[in-house]
Amino acid sequence: MVTDSHSPSRRPTMTDVAQRAGVSLKTVSRVVNGVQTVDPEMAGRVQEAADELGYRPNFAAAVLRSGARTATIGLLIKDLRNEFYATIAAAVADVARANGFQLITSYSGENADDELEAVQDLCRRRVDGLLIVPTSGDHAGLQKERDLGTPMVFLDRRPEGLDADAVVLDNFAGARAGTGMLLDEGHTRIGILIDTLRMPTMGERLNGVRQAYTDRGLSFDESLVVHNVATPDKAAKRMETILAAEQAPTAFFCGNNRSGVGALRTLWAHGRTEPLVCFDDFHLSDLMPRPVTVIGYDNYALGALGAELLFRRIRGEDFESQTVVLPTRLIRRGTTTDAPHPTSPVNQPTEGIQ
Amino acid sequence: MVTDSHSPSRRPTMTDVAQRAGVSLKTVSRVVNGVQTVDPEMAGRVQEAADELGYRPNFAAAVLRSGARTATIGLLIKDLRNEFYATIAAAVADVARANGFQLITSYSGENADDELEAVQDLCRRRVDGLLIVPTSGDHAGLQKERDLGTPMVFLDRRPEGLDADAVVLDNFAGARAGTGMLLDEGHTRIGILIDTLRMPTMGERLNGVRQAYTDRGLSFDESLVVHNVATPDKAAKRMETILAAEQAPTAFFCGNNRSGVGALRTLWAHGRTEPLVCFDDFHLSDLMPRPVTVIGYDNYALGALGAELLFRRIRGEDFESQTVVLPTRLIRRGTTTDAPHPTSPVNQPTEGIQ
DNA sequence: TACAGTTGGGACAACGTTGTCTACACCACA
DNA sequence: TGTGGTGTAGACAACGTTGTCCCAACTGTA
């Protein structure tokens, strides 16, 4: 049997460095942490030994002993291939970096159970805070984790059954303005394509649509609403049916960019020119063959404000749970000029997109 | 002076649970880890105590003691707002999740020093592996970290001055095919817009352009190459000058999607119809007012294959450093049908985009 | 009743680091 | 020469967990 004097790939520890430099463990600790009460000659020797061995401090051990922060936040988010989520992630990453924190990006899952499991894993890792872009409905399960001392901020959707901060969009006002524009242009039969109403944001947008009708003393025909349009492909298919119908709408409102893009594809494939308003701006929407009016917002700010809020909590600031509502902006293309519309007051972010 | 019997927000530990359940620390450990040699009645009592206190295992402490993996990988990447990087990040996130790992997404920085610093921070945190989408030129500084036991895989660019795995695109073949198409259509004055040649990928693409000329016995006019086109705005501006020139090119080749999008903007704003080939596909490129031919590739596969490679290393597989070259595909729009072109052999990924 | 074998639970040390306390050497000053 | 202060370094314990070892209590059998 061969005795291996040292396991081959074990990382060197402070003890190894101390031995090599002929000093105590604690002195190495002092040098590594830049404590000034070490004789320069000795510090030099220690540094040399550390370099030779390729010593790298074990951050987790230091955190464990000192009770310091892990300097890590978690982000629960769905699909980074989606421009909307990717921009949020970019904003959060920027703020984390500015604060010297690392960011763990985790999947928010398909339902409340997945979400809870992901949160619990991050809590086991003792992240200092969590940003959650929820997919599920009920967040009551997370209350316990928050009470246990992990601050949470929700992005894009208000938490349900849970007392926590949030940064959301003014979905109602945005949809109201977008629909209003179409109504004011004389359209009364507006086809509405939305994703499932289990997403509260969709409900808010649909209510905004209804309100635009009410504002003008018009009645809204609920049969013009097409539900569960979750993907561009679905939207494109549904549009085929809609356009073929006898009394086809003369204009369209799409609840998000996925349905919007799909609907446009079909519309243009048939050479149709019905105006379409899309909630969510999307990349290159200004380069499209026909002007696309969109309801845009500062997506980056959504993430950045959420992260800032979280860091205030992490720094120990204590305040009532708050919900920041970000304004949307109707970006008219090809009709009149861009015009902002009234919305809930909010500290307007200054960060630009791109 | 008030003695605080227990600090207010300290998380409960195994010791606390043990005390409450009236068992030993070790028994709690056994229950938490699902060891079967515990009396069910006692296990129940422990579980109950743990639930009441809101006990959450300290993952870092467990890793420290047991010497297990941190089950974490690091991803160094630049700007998630860029569709190219976001897709890579999404792929890496998916593979990490499939392996039960968490993903720390960190910024790869502007230069080799930033990059090294980011890598070192992740090594202090003892990530089990690193995926790097490099921005800098020289990676020799990372050799040490790799030797110390952190496997690394480079994405999109080959490592320089460092022995490590990589997954890259066949930039040369892609550019050659794209330029070849324009030449075969009869264009000989092709304007070339590229970013800085300090990006080796740009050099490979430019060489592909040159090769296309050589293939056909044509000579390439280097004065048609516009360098340092780093943003869409820059591309749009440079195009203004180019179009105004006396002997303007009759076709264009853009080195990446940033320059491509900017160039198209100016081209279309002037109602020009010169064909343009763009390296990198981009979102909605098929919905553009005029057909845009692009050199596309499976971006998601780039990230996924890199992550798979990394996990093989993490699992302890030992093999020579390898570089996987992903094929590109010339996507002709508005001219003929899509046609793949010959390229280096590689196990073709099956994952689709979106 | 005595003994071996099996089962379940606790005591203790260790992972790699830092906080606290103490010890020693040196200097200045009385 | 004694005293006190300062500057530097080491000993020891502790962070929250798990691995190892051992012991007590059962079981079944001769």
Image: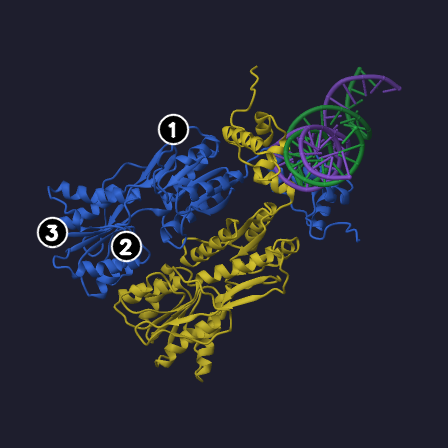
Chain colours: A yellow, B blue, C purple, D green
Q: Earlier in the sequence, mark 1 or mark 3?
A: 3
Do residues under tags 1 and 3 come within 8 Å of each other at their CB atoms? no
Q: Is A130 in front, or is B352?
A: A130
Chain letter of disc 3 in the image: B
Q: Secondary structure at mark 2?
A: helix
Q: Secondary structure at mark 1?
A: loop
Q: Secondary structure at mark 3?
A: loop
Give the residue type at disc 2: Ser
Do residues under tags 3 and 2 come within 8 Å of each other at their CB atoms? no
In the image, is residue A279 above or below residue B296?
below
Chain letter of disc 1 in the image: B
Cα–Cα gap, marks 1 and 3: 45 Å
Give the residue type at disc 3: Gly
Q: Residues within 10 Å of mark 2 (few under 14, many from 20)?
A: many
Give the residue type at disc 1: Glu
Q: Is D13 in front, or is A46?
A: A46
Pointer 2 residue: B259
Q: Earlier in the sequence, mark 3 or mark 2?
A: 3
Pointer 1 residue: B320
In the image, is residue A16 above or below residue B254?
above
* Residue B284 visible here: yes
Q: Is C20 in front, or is A153?
A: C20
Pointer 3 residue: B186
Chain letter of disc 2 in the image: B
How many marks can you see?
A: 3
Q: Is A100 in front, or is B65?
A: A100
